[in-house]
Image (cartoon, rainbow, N blue to C red):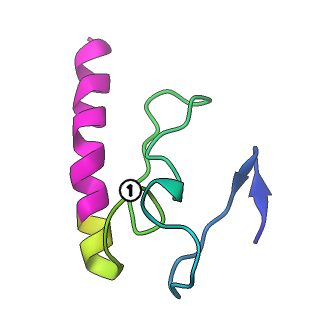
Amino acid sequence: MGQADGLELVESVVKEPGPVWKSKMSHEISHIKGLFFVGDSTVSYGIGTDSVAHSSILCHPKIEKFLENSN
């Protein structure tokens, strides 16, 4: 795995003990406003497709709030 601006690059095809729920990558970073992340590597419940879907559900309000505040 590599590093990019202090963030560990994540490949989550194979699940192994470790990052779960809130210990996963955040949906947003403070360095770049308006950049959001979703997927099984970000904060979410479940694995695979369930995790991806839950991640997008959790991130959606953050995106809406950003868009409301940027107008």
Q: As drawn, is 71 to the left or to the right of 34?
A: left
Magenta segment, prevailing SS (helix, strand or loop): helix
Q: As drawn, is 9 to the left or to the right of 57?
A: right
For the point 22% across and 36% down, which residue is it? 61
Relative depth, front residue between 34 and 17: 17
| Occupied quadrant, residue 54 | bottom left
- Residue 60: give x, y in percent of width and height: 23, 43
For the point 67% across and 63% down, which residue is it? 9
**Quarter of the image that includes the N terminus:** bottom right
Q: Which residue carries the number 1 mark?
A: 38
Q: As drawn, is 43 to the left or to the right of 63?
A: right
> Residue flagged by tag 1: what amino acid is it?
Val
For the point 78% across and 65% down, which residue is it? 2
Q: Is residue 56 above or below residue 6?
A: below
Residue bounds of the magenta highlight: 54-71
Q: As drawn, is 60 to the left or to the right of 44?
A: left
At label 1, counting other C-alpha atoms closer than 10 Å, the crowd grade (few under 14, some 14-19, many 20 or more) is: many
Reply yes or no: does residue 67 show up in magenta: yes
- Residue 68: give x, y in percent of width and height: 22, 18
For the point 30% across and 45% down, which residue is it? 59
**Quarter of the image that includes the C terminus:** top left
